[in-house]
Image: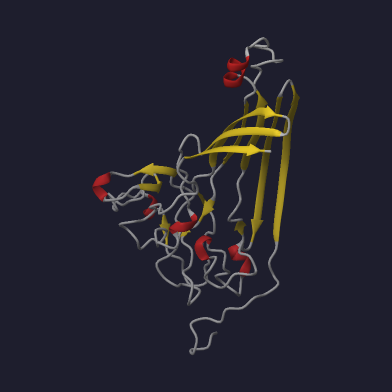
Amino acid sequence: YYSPQFSSLFAWRTIGNSSYNAGQFSLRHRSGGLAFDLNYTYSKSIDLGSNAERINEFEGFGLGSQIINSWFPKQNRGVSDFDTTHNVNANWVYNLPFGRGKRFGSRMNGITNAIFGGWTVSGLWHWSTGYPFSLLSPAWATNFQLETQAVPISSARPKTGSFIVPEASGTGPNVFKDPGITDPTNPNAAINLFRPAYPGEAGMRNGLRGPGTFNVDTGMLKSWQVREGQLVKFSWEMFNVTNSPRFDVGTMYADGNTSLSDVTSFGNFSSTLSNARVMEFGLRYSF
C-alpha cells in the first residue's frame, strides 16, 4: 500500500477539473456630473483543489486544497477556496454641483468658489458573502502526511460568521457562535458536531462559510488653476472608511484553530482580510 521508508510521496497529476457558473448584472450611469457602476455576480465554483501549480506541498495548505486520498481524488471535490455566492461592487465619481458655472452657487466670488466650488467625490464599495473553509481531524486517517478533514455527524451545521466568545475563556473573535471553548460538553457546540475521519475518508472540504468581504474607500479632489500651464491639486483619500474588520478563515489553519483537537482555541481568528482605516492627503503642483 505504501513504502515504509516514506511518510508520503508527494506528486503532481493532471487530473484536476473545475466548473464555474455565474450570472452577472451591471447598472451604469453617466450624466449630470455623476458616473457610477453597480455590479452584482451570483456564482458557484467547484473543483478538486484551488492551489496554484507554482506552489509547493505546504505553501497552499491554508485552505486545504491538497488531495487527501490519492486513490479516490473526487472525495476532495467541493466548492473552491475562493467561492463567493454573492458578490457586489460599485464605483462612482461625482463632480459636485457647487461653484461657478454649476447648478448651485454659479455666481460665487473668487474666494468662495476657491473654497467650496469644483470639488469631486469618488469611491469604491465591495461586499461579498462568506468564504468557505474546512475543519481538520486530529489524526492522519487516510494520508500519512496531511491531516484529514473532519466529517459532520449530522446535517446540522454550526452558526458561523464573526462572534465574540466570553473573554473569560481568553479568546477574541471566533468563526463560530458556540465553538465549545467555554463548554466543551455542550452537544450543540461546533466542535461536537464533527468527528475525525475514518481510514479511507477524506472528510468534508469547504463545507462551512466564514465572513466575506466588506470595504468602502472614498476620496475628495479639487484643483486650482493658478495661471496658464500651472495647476495645484489637493486630494484626500480614505481607505476602509467604516474601519470594519473582516476576519480571514484561511489563516486559521496555520495556527491550528480548525482542528478538532484544539479545544482551547477552536475557531479563533488570527488575522483579518482588511486593514485598519487609513487616510492619505496629497498636494500636487503641476507646471
- The residue at 49%/72% (across/down) is 146
Residue closer to the observer: 111 or 259: 111
Residue closer to the observer: 91 or 225: 225
Where's the C terminus, which quadrant?
Answer: top right
Name of the residue lying farthest toward the front: 227
Relative horizontal placement of residue 200, taking residue 174 as reference (left or right): right
- The residue at 69%/12% (across/down) is 103
- The residue at 62%/12% (across/down) is 109
Q: Position of residue 200 (x, y in %)?
A: 52, 72
Q: Quadrant of residue 116?
A: top right
Q: Position of residue 205 (x, y in %)?
A: 54, 59
- The residue at 60%/53% (across/down) is 82
Q: Position of residue 218 (x, y in %)?
A: 57, 34
Relative horizontal placement of residue 216, taking residue 256 as reference (left or right): right
Q: Position of residue 127 (x, y in %)?
A: 57, 39
Residue closer to the observer: 178 or 257: 257
Where's the N terminus, which quadrant?
Answer: bottom right
Residue 169 vs 42, above or below: the answer is below
